[in-house]
Amino acid sequence: MPTDGRKRPRIVASKVVLDASAFLAVANREPGADQVYPRLRESMMSVVNAAEVLQKLAQKGMSNKKADEYVRQFVHEIVDFDYRQAVLVAAIAPKTLPLGLTFADRACLALGYLRGVSVLTGDQKWEKVDLGIHIEVIRTTTNPV
């Protein structure tokens, strides 16, 4: 992805970046949650995706405090969004916007790329993303709330 000559980070198989949809599959007990749950211990999530999860949980009636505790209980590491991620989010926009990926989706992909780990999502349109990032799409039959 970077065009400045830097080498691509090595994939670390035991770690995974969670997209909001992957976490919400667990929270909502949706199909595909069984693929996410065993990976939570070594998971990380962008603070951008964490905000999306917190918002969705609040929309379902969970208090902000309870939602925060819930996310922190299951996600191993919440990663701050930084300038390097911002540069990548902007760089991949031309390839991902036509597929319908959001800013939060691109933040998730950027974190996975920079950390050299796989990205786990419940959004099947990510199967069309070709950025040199290992993307695992869980099989869901419903959209996350």
Image: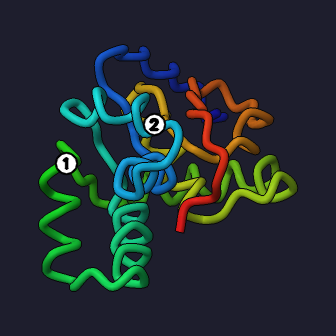
In the rendering, at what x and y percent does residue 25 appear? 45, 50
Left or right: 94 in relation to 79: right
* CA gap, disc 1 and disc 2: 18 Å
Residue 112's tag is: 2
Tell me if residue 79 comes above or below residue 50 in the rendering: above
Tell me if residue 120 comes above or below residue 96 in the rendering: above
In the rendering, at what x and y percent does residue 58 appear? 35, 82
The amino acid on which the numbered mark 1 sits, given as a three-letter code, is Phe
The number of discs equals 2
In the rendering, at what x and y percent does residue 18 appear? 41, 44
Residue at x 60%, y 65% (from the top left corner): 103
Res 40 quadrant in image: top left
Res 131 quadrant in image: top right
The kind of secondary structure element at disc 1 is helix
In the rendering, at what x and y percent does residue 67 appear? 23, 72
The residue nearer to you, when weighing 140 against 114, is 140
Residue at x 63%, y 58% (from the top left corner): 143
The kind of secondary structure element at disc 2 is helix
For disc 2, the neighbor class at 10 Å (few under 14, some 14 to 19, many from 20) is many
- Labels 1, 2: front one: 1
Residue at x 28%, y 27% (from the top left corner): 38
The amino acid on which the numbered mark 2 sits, given as a three-letter code, is Gly
Sequence-earlier tag: 1 or 2: 1
The residue nearer to you, when weighing 92 against 72, is 72
Q: Badges 1 and 2: C-beta atoms under 8 Å apart?
A: no
Question: Which residue position is annotated with label 1?
Answer: 74
Tell me the quarter of the image containing the N terminus.
top right
